[in-house]
């Protein structure tokens, strides 16, 4: 677990989520992507494509299903980068 | 804790749609008059969203074949293809489809959904990798889930993006199956199959093409987008449905690999369900004969598609794709789409309401599918209904009627 303020992946994820954050809520590791940001499942999958390209990694769909929060997304990027 | 708590959001959204008028997801056709007209709420309605591309649902040859099959073979097979549910007519249909497409093997499934579910989950194992176009149909996504394989999405219609993802995988990930569609059902756009053939061959992957909406519709002989783009012999697996151009229900998958026959033992959606009923098999066989012998059916369909596409373009509407038998009009929002769908129905035209997450790029659409059976007058009525819709939404604007 990384401290979110020191984590470049967290900051990158926040940047990619910006276009979806229409209510301008403060993002944290605990922010629920679907319910807090009101993003539907297809839009989340499209967002993850951006993340994949940013880090040159591939997210299998079964992993995408388990990503609920910004923290889950960030941790999955770290995990896939290690593999 | 209730089982139904998790549907609260869905229920709220559904109720909001119902408050706007009719139920777009539970509409009842009180009487189907013809392939292109029905009675809804006691009123005659032009059907402009039924995927009945060649209008064969009331074709005398197809209806007659179905009636004879019921008399000769009974109302149902009461069994799986794996047990007592394989009749000579199932085998004949499979051979006819394989011959038509020039493939070595064909398996018929009980629905189009099951054809994708059965072929994909049978072919691919947990050690393999599926790469699917982001806009693929739900049946393909569900096939990936049932396969238990690693599934990766690539950007819609982008062979370049597929190439990048296959390169990223390298030699990892077992055998690779790339899945795309010929004609995409919502927006009506066509896949660049020749490009996908090139990329899959470069990486030693297999290519699976779902031609559900394009079989019987594209290509000089109706063999789909793969025929139209000259790559039919390079497709590893070709899936299709009987519930669109063939006017019945059921589905199939053909392959140029004779080993595909093994799916008859390995595919759970093939083994653990009853086989296609004799009447459906017979009407599909007759419809395939119509497709083979009557190119005029396709010519009329494309003429109709052009009339609608040009008419709606002239009204200034934003359409999702170049001319094809699927014509989708972009709406400004979900609420706009729901309002417009209701207005069209009240004014005698049934179209499909397509809203996220069932649509690409979170757009809301009014989607139509043209049929050979639409008359020139009916298509003018559809265009004029859209002109009326535009004027209702913008009273200052006057649209020219056709």
Image (spheres, coloured by chain):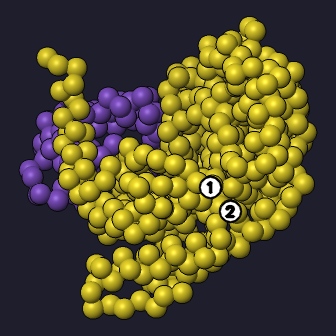
The residue sitting at 88% across, 52% down in the picture is B292
| Residue A28 shows in the view | yes
Give B347 or A16, whichever is nearer the viewer.
B347
Horizontal side of B241 relative to B368 (left or right) equals right
Quarter of the figure that contains the C terminus of chain B: bottom right
Q: Which residue, given by chain and number where applicable, does mark 2 sit on?
A: B373
Task: Give the chain letter at badge 2.
Answer: B
Horizontal side of B394 relative to B38 (left or right) equals left
Task: Please tell me whether residue B242 is drawn above or below residue B297 in the rendered image.
Answer: above
| Residue A10 shows in the view | no
For the view shown, which residue lies furthest in the left direction?
A: A26
Q: Give the chain ID for the purple colour.
A: A
Task: Give the chain letter at badge 1.
Answer: B
Whether label 2 touches label 1, CB < 8 Å: yes
Assign a secondary structure to mark 2. loop
Q: Quadrant of residue A9?
A: top left
For the view shown, which residue lies furthest in the top direction?
A: B83
- Where is residue B179 drawn, in percent x and y? 63, 41
Q: Which residue, given by chain and number where applicable, does mark 1 sit on?
A: B34
Q: Nearer the viewer, mark 2 or mark 1?
A: 1
């Amino acid at each position: 677990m990384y401290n979110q303020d020191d984590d470049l992946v967290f900051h990158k994820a926040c940047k990619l989520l910006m276009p979806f954050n229409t209510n301008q809520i403060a993002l944290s590791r605990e922010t629920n992507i679907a319910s807090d940001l009101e993003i539907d499942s297809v839009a989340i999958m499209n967002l993850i494509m951006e993340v994949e390209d940013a880090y040159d990694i591939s997210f299998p769909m079964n992993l995408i299903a388990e990503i609920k929060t910004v923290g889950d997304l960030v941790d999955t990027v770290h995990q896939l980068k290690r593999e | 804790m209730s089982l139904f708590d998790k549907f609260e959001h869905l229920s709220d959204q559904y109720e909001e749609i119902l408050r706007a008028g009719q139920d777009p997801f539970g509409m009842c056709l009180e009487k189907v008059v013809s392939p292109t007209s029905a009675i809804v709420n006691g009123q005659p309605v032009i059907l402009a969203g039924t995927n009945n591309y060649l209008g064969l649902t009331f074709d005398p040859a197809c209806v007659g074949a179905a009636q004879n099959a019921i008399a000769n073979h009974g109302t149902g097979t009461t069994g799986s293809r794996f047990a007592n549910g394989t009749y000579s007519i199932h085998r004949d249909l499979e051979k006819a489809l394989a011959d038509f497409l020039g493939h070595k093997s064909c398996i018929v499934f009980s629905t189009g959904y099951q054809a994708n579910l059965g072929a994909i989950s049978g072919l691919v194992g947990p050690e393999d990798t599926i790469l699917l176009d982001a806009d693929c149909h739900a049946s393909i996504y569900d096939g990936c889930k049932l396969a238990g394989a690693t599934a990766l999405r690539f950007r819609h219609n982008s062979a370049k993006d597929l190439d990048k993802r296959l390169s990223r995988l390298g030699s990892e990930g077992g055998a690779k199956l790339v899945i795309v569609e010929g004609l995409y059902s919502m927006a009506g756009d066509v896949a660049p199959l020749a490009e996908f053939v090139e990329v899959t061959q470069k990486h030693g992957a297999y290519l699976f093409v779902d031609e559900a909406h394009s079989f019987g519709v594209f290509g000089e002989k109706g063999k789909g987008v793969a025929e139209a783009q000259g790559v039919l012999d390079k497709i590893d697996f070709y899936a299709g449905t009987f519930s669109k151009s063939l006017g019945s229900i059921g589905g199939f998958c053909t392959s140029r690999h004779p080993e595909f026959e093994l799916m008859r033992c390995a595919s759970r959606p093939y083994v653990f369900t009853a086989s296609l009923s004799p009447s459906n098999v017979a009407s599909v066989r007759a419809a395939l004969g119509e497709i083979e012998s009557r190119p005029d059916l396709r010519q009329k369909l494309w003429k109709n598609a052009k009339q609608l596409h040009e008419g709606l373009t002239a009204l200034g509407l934003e359409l999702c794709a170049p001319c094809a038998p699927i014509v989708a009009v972009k709406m400004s929002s979900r609420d706009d789409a729901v309002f417009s769908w209701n207005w069209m129905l009240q004014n005698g035209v049934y179209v499909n309401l397509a809203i996220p997450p069932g649509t690409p790029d979170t757009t809301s659409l009014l989607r139509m599918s043209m049929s050979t059976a639409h008359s020139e007058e009916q298509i003018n009525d559809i265009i004029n209904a859209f002109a009326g819709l535009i004027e209702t939404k913008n009273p200052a604007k006057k649209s020219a009627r056709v």
